Image: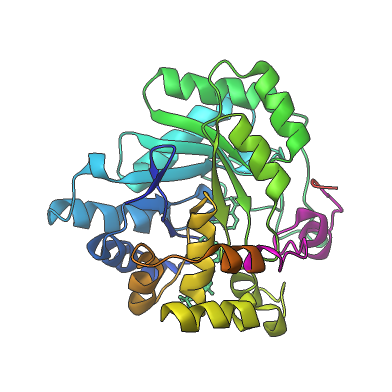
Amino acid sequence: MLRVKGMPAVGFGLWKLAKEDCAECVYQAIAAGYRHLDSASDYGNEAEVGEGIARALADGLCQREELWVTSKLWNTYHAPEHVRPALLKTLADLRLDYLDLYLIHFPIAQPFVPFEKRYPPGWLLEPDATQPRMELAAVPLYQTWQAMEALVEEGLVKQIGVCNYNSGLLHDLHSYARIKPAMLQIESHPYLTQERLIQLAQQYDMGVTAFSPLGALSYLELEMAGAQESVLQQEVVQAAAARVGRTPAQVVLRWGIQRGTAIIPKTSRPERLRENLALFDFSLNDDEMAAISALNQNRRFNDPGAFCAAAFNRFHPIYD
Ligand SMILES: NC(=O)c1ccc[n+]([C@@H]2O[C@H](COP(=O)([O-])OP(=O)(O)OC[C@H]3O[C@@H](n4cnc5c(N)ncnc54)[C@H](OP(=O)(O)O)[C@@H]3O)[C@@H](O)[C@H]2O)c1
């Protein structure tokens, strides 16, 4: 399979995979040929992901070394003394002894919540309070990065990187990183093409992973997008799908890998698992690539500047 900085270009995204389906979905994904899993402590399903991986390995579907497993450090574990325990918890849940890639989930530090109090802790410090609120902790990102570097040196993670950084934070990170970030994971799809940020990351020799590669679809159930915002309805997407004889979703995903980003689509449906991986026996022509890129509206569905105020009682933009 095509690779982005050594990582399989198509991964299986695990956010919002229900616990009860998760182990079986992970097993089915590996059986269908996925060799890259995009996990996170915050998704609340790492133990079930680990169960699916363990079953797949035990059944001989692949070897551990053929799998690329990414996970992410949650906001409440940014203080240097919490980074290693957070990674060890993730490794224990995933039943692995190393990660291929560990990412800082958000450039947002929040107060520590002990594992035994709540795991994963989410965004709110005291969810049961009468007026629950997202709180912040004064932890500079360079300190978190130094603790991430120590994980590489100890052999617990092969590579480290960041999510949801803007260009200013990337410049800053590169000014102090002893171990350079291998990957930038950001929201990107035809309505949020992020060309300059992607170009900058590539200039820094980083790979780029596009999350929510299908755009609005992930955000309908969260009421953070409207059905009319689906890029699959766009005429240029539908015309390309008709020409290549594929689904509109496959066209949007193919656009993602053809522009050089990795993609990590999530689905809980077996037939879509196969659909979302079947992207390598067709291609889009230059006109189709350009027309899909031209759909850009800088529409960000996953925006702390919007959802923190709406859901967590705190205005906290990070991209503006
Ligand atoms: N780093 C971060 O901050 C961050 C943020 C968000 C996401 N992520 C990662 O990126 C992954 C992907 O993003 P995402 O889950 O937000 O969005 P996504 O993969 O773009 O879209 C998922 C949605 O699309 C539907 N879908 C999947 N395949 C489809 C197809 N072939 N045709 C039609 N609908 C389809 C799914 O429904 P069904 O399940 O019903 O098929 C689901 O509602 C996540 O799972 C997570 O691993 C990272």
166 or 246: nearer the viewer: 246
**Drawn side of residue 60 relative to residue 101, left or right:** left
Circle count: 0
In front of the other: 99 or 234: 234
From the top left corner, tell me how far across and down residue 67 is, in percent: 29, 46
Horizontal arrangement in the rendering, residue 204 relative to residue 16 (left or right): right
Find residue 91 and report its horizontal and vertical position in percent.
38, 39
Q: Which residues are magenta?
A: 292-317
What residue is shown at x 67% (from left), y 36% (from top)?
Answer: 200
Q: Is residue 297 magenta?
A: yes
Residue occupying the point 30% across, 44% down: 95
Q: Is residue 32 above or below residue 86?
A: below
Q: Looking at the picture, does residue 177 appear above or below residue 34?
A: above
The question of residue 296 being in magenta is answered with: yes
Residue occupying the point 82% across, 65% down: 310
* Rendering colour mode: rainbow
Name which quarter of the figure residue 204 lies in: top right
Q: Can residue 121 be seen by looking at this rendering?
A: yes
Give above or below for 98 relative to 44. Answer: above
Q: Horizontal and vertical percent for residue 179?
A: 53, 19
* Res 163 quadrant in image: top right
Where does the image place residue 184, in percent across and percent down from the top left?
A: 58, 40
Residue situated in front as seen by the camera: 57 or 133? 57
Residue 115 in sight: no
